[in-house]
Image (spheres, rainbow, N blue to C red):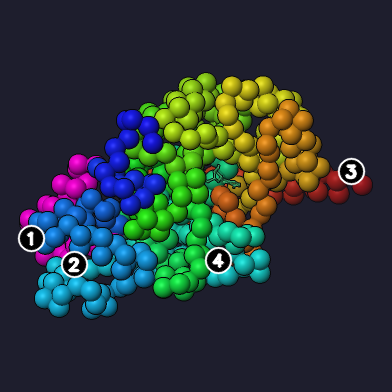
């Protein structure tokens, strides 16, 4: 752990972080004795401690509560037999343990599982579990939709409604773990890895994402190692620097192009934070990690857009000074997009060039596409506040109509010329 990070308790390699304003807000809940019950799900260890101290209780109650919630999946205080009856009654009156509601759960033929989760106001988010040999990776959402408008992403096309709360973020891990019945004494862990690669840009929901990740890594929470919690970002430079002050989870960046001109089109936030600045921020982030780390560079391969051999060479040159591995993601189609997935040959050629330049390069296999759970296909149900969805649907329809008209006139011409 580097010096600028502030470990508070020693129960975990993941650390309990002090974030004063989080603690203050927990205390405010108690002080104001709000009519709404306080949701203890999503509170960090520090917040829970502050909560109990304000109730006039001992700090170790936080420890007990976390074990009940995250180790044993308790949903009610009645189950908490090592807590006195009077405290349980008090907690029942003022607090609750509430995850968001699951609308549906589907399991793909390949074992991938997807939940559609309701978060109020007609909004839904999606969470995906991907089982692989010896591990289970959960892809977690951080926002309802996304305000960044990457041209190849289904989430971006839905527009944006709001940030998820810490309870809604950690709730996704809780729901998944419970659905595999892995939150009970002696059970095997189902979720071994978490990737913040679902809907939304996690660094635009900084505080809630950091709190939720702390609970994922805390031994009193899900106890997942910091190397197995990955945050993926489209490249927000100041927030990457800020992240380095709070945590050292694994970092992935969505690069998708080796040159600014093209990246400006694919990932519009590049106009604000161009590639050179982004890579410098990645190196600064790595410098804050105490152990040896690499950045995962995500590169969605889109046919005829960024999959040419020239681009592979440019990418190899670009990344020479960044300790990294490269994850190629063949584009996953969705209804509002006209992009195409490259041929297997094009993917293999691209990978080969990078491998020959000594980059560890993997191609992400498409999982769960029979249940629309593949990367970039998560659309959820977003009550859009940006009117972007409306614009896209309209422009997509207009484009389709224009293509159909063009085709019709071509056919008419062919018939005339016969
Ligand atoms: N907002 C964050 C995390 C969510 S997106 C980010 O952009 O990094 C998770 C990953 O899926 C990103 O690398 C993103 O570029 C990729 N992705 C988005 N749409 C895709 C699509 N249609 N096909 C393949 N990958 C896609
Ligand atoms: Fe948002 Fe990431 Fe999709 Fe871009 S790729 S629109 S940042 S979710």
Number of marks in picture: 4
Reading the chain from its start, which is encountered first: label 3 or label 1? 1
- Image-based side of 276 in relation to 12, left or right: right
Cα distance between the residues tagged 2 and 4 = 31 Å
Q: Which residue does the numbered mark 2 point to in the structure image?
A: 95
Query: Can see residue 133?
Result: yes
How many other residues sit within 10 Å of disc 1, few (<14), some (14-19) or many (≥20)? few
Quadrant in which residue 298 is drawn: top right
- Circles 3 and 1, Cβ within 8 Å, touching? The answer is no
**Label 3 CB less than 8 angstroms from ligand 1:** no
135 in magenta:
no
Cα distance between the residues tagged 2 and 3 = 78 Å
Which of the two residues, 21 or 161, is positioned nearer the viewer here? 21
Cα distance between the residues tagged 3 and 4 = 54 Å
Q: Which residue does the numbered mark 3 point to in the structure image?
A: 417
Quadrant in which residue 38 is drawn: bottom left
Q: Nearer the viewer, mark 4 or mark 1?
A: 1
Cα distance between the residues tagged 4 and 1 = 43 Å
Q: Where is residue 293 in the image (x, y as percent from the top left)?
A: 53, 35
- Circles 3 and 4, Cβ within 8 Å, touching? The answer is no
Reading the chain from its start, which is encountered first: label 2 or label 3? 2
Cα distance between the residues tagged 1 and 2 = 15 Å
Reading the chain from its start, which is encountered first: label 3 or label 4? 4
**Residue drawn 63% across the image and 37% down it:** 326
Q: Which residue does the numbered mark 4 point to in the structure image?
A: 113
Cα distance between the residues tagged 3 and 1 = 90 Å
Q: Which of marks 3 and 1 is in front?
A: 1
- Indicate whether 7 appears above or below 274: below
Q: Position of residue 276 (x, y in %)?
A: 52, 21
Which of the two residues, 250 or 223, is positioned nearer the viewer here? 223
Q: Which residue does the numbered mark 1 point to in the structure image?
A: 56
- Residue at the far right: name it: 418
């Amino acid at each position: 752990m580097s010096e600028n990070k502030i470990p508070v308790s020693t129960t975990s390699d993941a650390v309990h972080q002090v974030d004063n304003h989080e603690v203050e807000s927990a205390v405010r809940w108690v002080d104001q004795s709000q009519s709404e019950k306080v949701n203890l799900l999503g509170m960090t260890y520090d917040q829970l401690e502050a909560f109990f101290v304000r109730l006039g209780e001992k700090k170790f109650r936080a420890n007990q509560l976390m074990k009940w919630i995250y180790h044993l999946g308790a949903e009610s205080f009645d189950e908490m037999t090592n807590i006195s009856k009077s405290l349980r009654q008090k907690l029942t009156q003022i607090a609750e343990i509430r995850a968001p509601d699951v609308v549906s759960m589907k399991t793909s033929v390949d074992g991938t599982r997807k939940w559609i989760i309701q978060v109020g106001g007609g909004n839904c988010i999606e969470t995906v579990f991907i089982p692989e040999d010896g591990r289970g990776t959960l892809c977690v959402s951080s926002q309802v939709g996304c305000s960044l408008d990457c041209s190849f992403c289904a989430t971006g096309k839905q527009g944006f409604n709001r940030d998820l709360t810490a309870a809604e973020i950690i709730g996704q891990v809780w729901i998944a773990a419970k659905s595999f019945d892995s939150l009970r004494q002696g059970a095997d862990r189902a979720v071994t890895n978490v990737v913040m690669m679902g809907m939304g840009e996690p660094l635009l929901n900084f505080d809630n994402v950091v709190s939720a990740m702390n609970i994922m890594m805390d031994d009193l929470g899900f106890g997942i190692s910091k190397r197995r919690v990955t945050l993926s970002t489209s490249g927000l430079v100041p927030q990457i620097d800020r992240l380095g002050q709070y945590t050292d989870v694994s970092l992935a960046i969505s690069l998708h192009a080796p040159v600014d001109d093209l990246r400006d089109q694919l990932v519009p936030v590049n106009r604000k934070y161009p590639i050179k600045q982004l890579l410098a921020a990645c190196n600064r982030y790595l410098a804050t990690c105490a152990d040896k780390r690499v950045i995962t560079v995500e590169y969605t391969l889109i046919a005829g857009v960024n999959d040419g051999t020239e681009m592979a060479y440019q990418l190899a040159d670009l990344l020479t000074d960044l300790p990294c591995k490269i994850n190629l993601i063949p584009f996953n189609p969705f209804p509002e997009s006209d992009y195409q997935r490259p041929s297997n040959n094009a993917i293999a050629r691209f990978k080969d060039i990078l491998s020959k330049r000594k980059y560890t390069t993997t191609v992400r296999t498409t999982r769960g596409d029979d249940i629309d759970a593949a990367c970039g296909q998560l659309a959820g149900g977003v009550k859009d506040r940006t009117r972007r969805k409306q614009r896209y649907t309209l422009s997509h329809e207009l484009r389709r109509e224009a293509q159909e008209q063009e085709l019709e006139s071509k056919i008419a011409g062919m018939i005339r010329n016969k």
